[in-house]
Image (cartoon, helix red, strand yellow):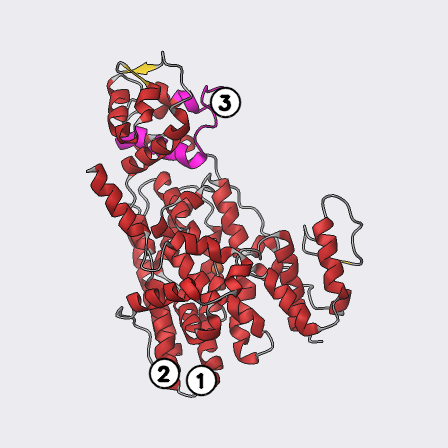
Amino acid sequence: MAGLYKALRKSRETTPHGSSKAMYFSLLEAAHIKRAGGPCAGFLAAQLQATRGHSTSMPTQAGQLNSWLAAHNETVGRQYQQYLASRQAGGPRRYFHSKAHALYFLRAVAPTKMVDGAWLYGVTRHWQDTRLASLIRIYLEELGDGAEAMNHVALYRKLLRVNGCDDWKTLDDQFFTQGAVQLALAANTETHLPEVIGFNLGYEQLPLHLLITAYELKELNIDPYYFTLHTTIDNAQTGHAHAAVEAVAEAMPLFGDSRQYMARVLAGVKLNDAGLSTLEIIRQFDLQQEVVRILQAKATIGRFMHANRCEIAGKSINAWLADSDQMVPFLHAMEKTGWIKRHHAPEESPFWKTFAGEKAPMFGVFTAYEQQVLYDWIAGDALENMPMLGRLGRPWRMVEKQGLAREAGKNNPHDNVYDLRTGGRIARLPVSHDFNQDQVSFECHVHSMDDGQALMEFLAGWLSPGKHHTPLGLCATRYFKSYLDSPF
Ligand SMILES: [Fe+2]
Ligand SMILES: [Fe+2]
């Protein structure tokens, strides 16, 4: 059985064009994303082929997109009202059974969210082409226009960190397919512009699951800001959903055959189906399986860390942990010997006390996410009766989000020097010290460049999906937007 499971898992881990995960991390390197073709182009072609037969309600005529957009938003709005009515009538949560389930979701979609907007990166090198203005605007807004507090990737990274989910890079290959597709589109934009436009059109539309996710995350004491932000910034009237429709018409003159163009746009729309869907990820959660996975991961080190006199059911803990197939019997043994009291408050279980609480002997062994999984599993049928603090943790605080660095572009752009930390404009270059040498050399380089085209190319390199959320990437984004808004 274990062999069959491993074989099934392995078969999901490779596509005809190799591992999605390897592709994902390779394309995150700025140098690789510039070099299109090869395995990356093959991967994209295979994903386009795999989704070609999928259905979509998107119209084939560009002129019908606005009415489609209005109808789509009305349908989603009505469905959300029905959901709210069912919740107000006492109905259960639709997606997340417990906080651990919601955190599992946040971690599982991390490979996609950590490259939010990436599919548009390839258009930045065409910053002078007004037919791509809407696409460039969307990309810069995904990057928060260079303000860290509004950069979607930085926001998601913080959400992961706050909830102990930042070990997402260890996820299986299947979770990386959607993100790898987004990066592959960025790498192949020169030959796939209509597909990029179509992918953007599909991605930027408001889905019902976004509204429900935000509602249930808040209920489970998880900051929903990343998700509520997307219900506002992607809005259909002035937001990304609307700009994505505009982008279809704006770029059409670049292509002689509008029917062929729209066919490729639709292929890009369907590419949104590549990899696991949001609902598939939510549905595949199995609490006990997640407990087993966590113990298996800890066992690689834990098998050497216990004294041999520590025994459970006549077997040393080191021996239990030495065999990853023994985790389910190990859990049963802990239940039988009273180390775990399922369906009771976890604080009553000696196992829980070994790692939870300030002076616990195994303090720090499990992340906040892993502790939540263990809490929910031990509490079992009694979970909903547990006190709020134990079940949902300390309340998250609504932190006032910093506004955008709106002053960009007001003065002569060649006088710009930005403070890396606040994003505000400062008058002159900072004095160099050990903590800002990268910034000073970056600023000196920017201010020494007279050739506008070369400067924008240099800045665009810092806008890549792997770099734009770093301090220099954010600074480069502010310069890029500033120069874009105030031509030379
Ligand atoms: Fe976004
Ligand atoms: Fe967006």
Q: On the rendered structure, is 346 left or right of 479?
A: left
Residue 384 in view of the camera: no
User: According to the image, label 1 marks what residue?
Assistant: 255
**Percent x, y for residue 424?**
70, 56
The quadrant where residue 92 appears:
top left
Could you say whether the residue bearing mark 3 is in a helix, strand or loop? loop
| Disc 1/disc 3 C-alpha distance (Å) | 64 Å
Lower position in the chain sequence, tag 1 or tag 3: 1
Looking at numbered disc 3 in the image, what kind of residue is underneath it?
Glu
Q: How many marks?
A: 3
Q: Residue at x 45, y 67 (%)?
A: 37
**Is ligand 2 within 8 Å of the beta carbon of the residue shown at mark 1?**
no
User: According to the image, label 2 marks what residue?
Assistant: 260
User: According to the image, label 3 marks what residue?
Assistant: 358
Q: On the rendered structure, is 57 left or right of 22?
A: left
Please tell me which residue lies in front, 21 or 370: 21
> Would you place residue 305 above or below residue 180 in this image?
above
Near mark 1 (Cα within 10 A), the count class, few <14, some 14-19 or many ≥20, is few
The quadrant where residue 127 appears:
bottom right
Could you say whether the residue bearing mark 2 is in a helix, strand or loop? helix
Taking the magenta stretch, the answer to whether it contains residue 317 is: no
The magenta region covers 353-381
| Disc 3/disc 2 C-alpha distance (Å) | 64 Å
Please, which residue is most extreme toward the left here?
A: 1
Taking the magenta stretch, the answer to whether it contains residue 380 is: yes
The quadrant the N terminus occupies is top left
